[in-house]
Amino acid sequence: MSTDAASGPLVSVPPPDRHLDRGRWPGLLDVPHGARTQAYARIARALFHQVVERLDLTVRVGEGPDAPVWGRGGPVMILRRPDEFFARLGRGGLIGFGEAYLTGAWDVPGGEEGASPSALGDVLTVLAAQMPTLVPGWMQRLRTAYVQRPPRHQVSSTENSRSNIAHHYDLSNDLFTAFLDPTMSYSSALFEHQTIARIDPVGGHEVATAPDPREPASLEEAQARKIERLLDEARVGPGSRVLEIGTGWGELALRAARRGATVHSVTLSTEQQALARERIAADGFADAVTVDLCDYRDVVAPEGGYDAVVSVEMIEAVGFDYWTTYFQKIDEVLAPGGRAGIQAILMPHDRMLATRRTYTWINKYIFPGGFLPSVPVIDEITRDATSLRLLGEANRLSFGGHYAETLRRWDEAFLTSWEDVRALGFDDTFARMWHFYLEYSRAGFASGYIDVQQLVLEKRA
């Protein structure tokens, strides 16, 4: 189906399932309890109240006519079971916050109350815009004492990476087909025809302004624009030998092959490999593109090296501990004078440093082992450990607003297609989880808390 805009009425988000399969969702219905939980819940309630009172948000604490209302007015958040919400928030932080949405301890108004499916993202955007200051400074200094650490089995080592990737990308190709555009591109699109809109006065790099949601450009066209720009920056053309780290479902490899390049693409997803190979063969490029099930660390370059390395939103799965390994491998396989074009989701450097050992809701439910880098850490690693150099303003593009619009369209398509997805065997809790994931991500980009950029590195000759 087309995902440019919903062709019919949007379905509502399924309500919480109080009889969910505990084997599929272990521990989700177990509300924290005990004396310590009660103490943490009281602290969480006081801090949350304090935060909300300075935000453009409306929080209803309970559902009765006499329920307190907090906040300065704005998107509506309903604490349907306040005691459970604060117990989960106090003991689990942002993981507890997300789990409380899955169980329905908090929610946004439903369709019968006049709210749209984007209501969740509107609430989360207000919170994301204040993310660095939501927790008081004195508590942030103590974060190492109370935040959860990523479990060892999720660290993106050679032994763990395959299972980390399978957790998300091997769910079902049909699931992703339900909400992605025909290119099967699972990364930010680039909507404006004129991609370079202004110069960031602070960072100096080129920035694409946020797209107008009413723009008629299709998601398919915008995804093609994103890929073609990255291939241009990596100087991929006739005769180029290209390594792609992270195949996706094959669209970038196909477009590089149409330019006359030969492509070696590597992935750890069996589902993606199968569909990418099918698409490549159907387009007649099986002789020009190979798709191997291979860890990036095991790639061996052809004699003379690759002319270009391209990687779209794969570095997020590499993990903090392996960024140096990742860039050293690119340096090792790239020919002198060759370029690496990388599209990466990024966070501010100070937040990256503060959260690099934190276990998050996204890690637990969506992307095990994942973590977002910053531009300064990429520049530092490549300068200290490789012969790669990050190119400057003329080659770098920031377009986080475009990711917010991409995610809005994905979520709209997902909700519209929910009955088809349900038929694949996914339950209503999965629908709430996926909706939360897409809107949580949209909020990060819409608020500017996180960004997506195309970065270009060149290997010194």
Image (cartoon, rainbow, N blue to C red):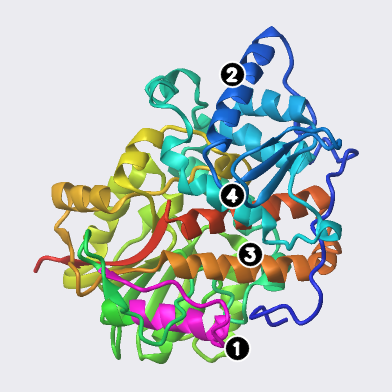
Residue of label 2: 43
What's under tag 3, amino acid-wise? Glu
Disc 4 marks a residue whose amino acid type is: Leu
The residue at which mark 1 appears reads as 282
Helix, strand or loop under label 1: helix
Q: Residues within 10 Å of mark 2 (few under 14, many from 20)?
A: some
Magenta residues? 206-230
Residue closer to the observer: 363 or 23: 363
Above or below for 434 versus 199: above
Separation of residues labelled 3 and 2 (CA atoms): 45 Å
Q: Earlier in the sequence, mark 1 or mark 2?
A: 2
Q: Are marks 3 and 1 in contact (CB under 8 Å)?
A: no
For marks 4 and 3 on the same chain, the one whose residue lies earlier in the sequence: 4
Query: Could you tell which of marks 1 and 4 lies nearer the N-terminus?
Result: 4
Q: Is residue 19 magenta?
A: no
Depth order, front residue of 294/283 = 283
* Residue placed under numbered mark 3 in the picture: 271
Dot placed on the residue nearer the N-terminal end, 3 or 1: 3
- Give the label, 1 or 2, closer to the camera: 2
Disc 2/disc 4 C-alpha distance (Å): 21 Å
Q: Amino acid at mark 1?
A: Ala
Residue, x 52% and y 76% (percent of image)? 250
Picture quadrant of residue 38: top right
